[in-house]
Image (cartoon, rainbow, N blue to C red):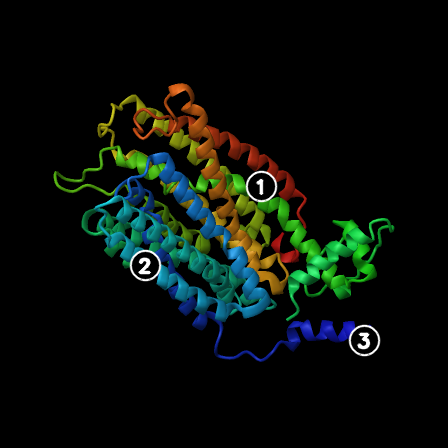
């Protein structure tokens, strides 16, 4: 009991370590600028990748969309490995340095591959091989960089101090704001450079916590024949600030050989699984904006003047512009008003924000399906449609509004709800949602393309989009996302937060 008393005393606000002039916003601002630079590079590649694959590389629309989704999935999935390495071996700072070096090397090789001109089949094979090797080297670099840089930034604020805890929430908001500034500039500038000037120039611009948690599950299985134990003791769960330890009581059987903190860590991780799984459906929807939305835009009237055409990939900047406009409104107006009603430091709970995004994504898919139906009604084979490309703007704007609610919400959720030693993995779990979503999107496209083109029928993803049926695909996604929202609400309602101020 004396040890527990000392632990409680050491964790109380009156016994915090002396605050140094470093950390806080002084360091966080620099980290935001570093993240902006990375987003500038990443967006320059991802936003127009499908155009490059169907253009200079000569791939079909379905194959290019599947390849883009596979790469995007890898980019979002590899942070799980990067987070594991950072949390278990290298730490955030060294992981960031190594990953950044690989990232820069991949960018250089990618730029070089796009300068190669194919005059024979062997040269084309070399270009394609170097191109994909470069892409996946970049993915490895991103896998180490992305989960660690956000944790490194959030760790500049003291979560035990109420004022700094609120500031940390603002950090995630302004991190997203900075990222969207970078993305907007990139999509306005690099898409034009890549399509109209040069693709090469456009591309160039402690103890292992897993062992502890794993041991809890192993010991719980080994002791499965023993009766459940009631081991809840508030004084011993201070590190997790857990309100309720009655969930997953089967893990209490591990108490014969594991201490309570280890069991609570395992429960905290297990609680994330249903939320993670039900978030995958809208991640499939998220994967559509840099692929089929862009291909739709390429078939429509993109002229601003007689000589100036808007690159189709540039329309993606409306997502970022919406976020840039909406984040200050959300952070400075919506949150204080909501806080006055809910008494929640973040205005509304993290899970409420995530649920709002899923609902907005359903609306986005309905709008996209209706716009595509209208586009097909005015379409002719392989001819640019007189329908203006600006008809696509509403679905991009809805994506942006949805991202304000959830991009920050997911980052906070997976940072705040995991044990402190697993925060890099927490951020990686956040990114892996979009990785798995991209893989599932790629799988769906491949299966639907094969099924709908059977017996000589026209595929939903025919190379001539004027003969395809993307509207059917969007309606399918709207239905799947509605089912996903229903499942999400069921799990979110029973979720128990690790920290009381999240209600």
The answer to whether residue 315 is visible is no
Q: Which numbered mark, 3 or 2, is in the foreground of this view?
A: 2
C-alpha separation, residue under disc 3 versus residue under disc 2: 60 Å
Q: Check disc 3 and report its element: helix, strand or loop.
A: helix
- From the top left corner, tell me how far across and down residue 426 is, in percent: 57, 57
Residue 2's disc number: 3
The answer to whether residue 130 is visible is yes
C-alpha separation, residue under disc 3 versus residue under disc 1: 43 Å
C-alpha separation, residue under disc 2 versus residue under disc 1: 37 Å
Residue 102's disc number: none
- From the top left corner, tell me how far across and down residue 149 is, in percent: 47, 64
Q: Which of 75 and 174 is in front in this view?
A: 75
Q: Which residue is drawn at 82% across and 72% down?
A: 1
Residue 113 placement: quadrant: bottom left
Q: Which of marks 2 and 1 is nearer the N terminus?
A: 2
- From the top left corner, tell me how far across and down residue 143 is, in percent: 47, 58
- The answer to whether 90 is drawn above or below residue 200 in the figure is below
Residue 109's disc number: 2
Q: Nearer the viewer, residue 192 or 106?
A: 106
Residue 462 placement: quadrant: top left
Query: Number of callouts in the render?
Result: 3
Instruction: Name the residue that disc number 1 marks.
Output: 278
Q: Which of marks 3 and 1 is nearer the N terminus?
A: 3
């Amino acid at each position: 009991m004396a040890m527990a008393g000392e632990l409680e005393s050491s964790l109380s606000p009156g016994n915090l370590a002396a605050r140094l002039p470093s950390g806080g916003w002084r360091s966080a601002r620099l980290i935001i600028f570093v993240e902006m630079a990375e987003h500038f590079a990443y967006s320059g590649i991802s936003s127009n990748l499908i155009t490059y694959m169907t253009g200079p590389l000569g791939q079909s629309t379905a194959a290019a969309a599947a390849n883009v989704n596979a790469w995007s999935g890898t980019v979002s999935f590899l942070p799980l490995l990067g987070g594991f390495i950072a949390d278990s071996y290298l730490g955030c700072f060294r992981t960031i340095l190594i990953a950044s070096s690989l990232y820069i090397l991949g960018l250089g090789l990618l730029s070089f591959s796009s300068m190669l001109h194919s005059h024979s089949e062997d040269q084309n094979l070399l270009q394609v091989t170097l191109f994909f090797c470069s892409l996946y080297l970049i993915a490895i670099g991103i896998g180490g960089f992305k989960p660690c840089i956000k944790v490194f930034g959030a760790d500049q604020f003291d979560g035990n101090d109420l004022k700094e805890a609120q500031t940390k929430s603002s950090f995630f908001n302004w991190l997203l704001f900075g990222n969207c500034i970078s993305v907007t500039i990139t999509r306005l500038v690099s898409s034009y450079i890549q399509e109209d000037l040069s693709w090469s120039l456009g591309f160039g611009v402690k103890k292992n916590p897993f062992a502890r948690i794993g041991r809890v599950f192993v010991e719980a299985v080994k002791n499965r024949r023993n009766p459940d134990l009631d081991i809840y003791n508030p004084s011993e769960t201070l590190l997790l600030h857990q309100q309720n330890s009655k969930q997953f009581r089967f893990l209490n059987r591990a108490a014969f050989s594991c201490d309570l903190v280890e069991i609570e860590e395992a429960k905290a991780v297990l609680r994330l699984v249903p939320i993670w799984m039900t978030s995958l459906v809208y991640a499939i929807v998220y994967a559509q904006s840099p692929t089929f939305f862009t291909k739709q835009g390429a078939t429509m009237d993109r002229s601003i003047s007689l000589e100036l055409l808007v690159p189709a990939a540039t329309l993606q900047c409306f997502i970022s512009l919406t976020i840039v406009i909406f984040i200050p409104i959300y952070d400075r107006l919506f949150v204080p008003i909501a806080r006055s009603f809910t008494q929640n430091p973040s205005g509304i709970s993290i899970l409420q924000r995530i649920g709002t995004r899923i609902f907005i994504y359903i609306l986005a898919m309905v709008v996209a399906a209706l716009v595509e139906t209208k586009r097909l009604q005015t379409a002719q084979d392989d001819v640019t449609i007189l329908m203006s490309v600006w008809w696509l703007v509403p679905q991009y704007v809805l994506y942006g509004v949805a991202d304000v609610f959830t991009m920050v919400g997911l980052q906070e959720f997976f940072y705040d709800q995991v044990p402190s030693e697993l925060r890099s993995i927490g951020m990686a779990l956040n990114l892996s949602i979009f990785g798995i979503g991209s893989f599932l999107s790629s799988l769906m496209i491949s299966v639907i393309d094969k099924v709908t083109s059977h017996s000589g029928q026209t595929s939903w993803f025919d190379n001539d989009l004027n003969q395809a049926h993307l509207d059917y695909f969007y309606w399918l996604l709207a239905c799947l996302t509605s089912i996903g929202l229903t499942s999400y609400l069921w799990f979110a309602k029973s979720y128990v937060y690790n920290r009381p101020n999240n209600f």
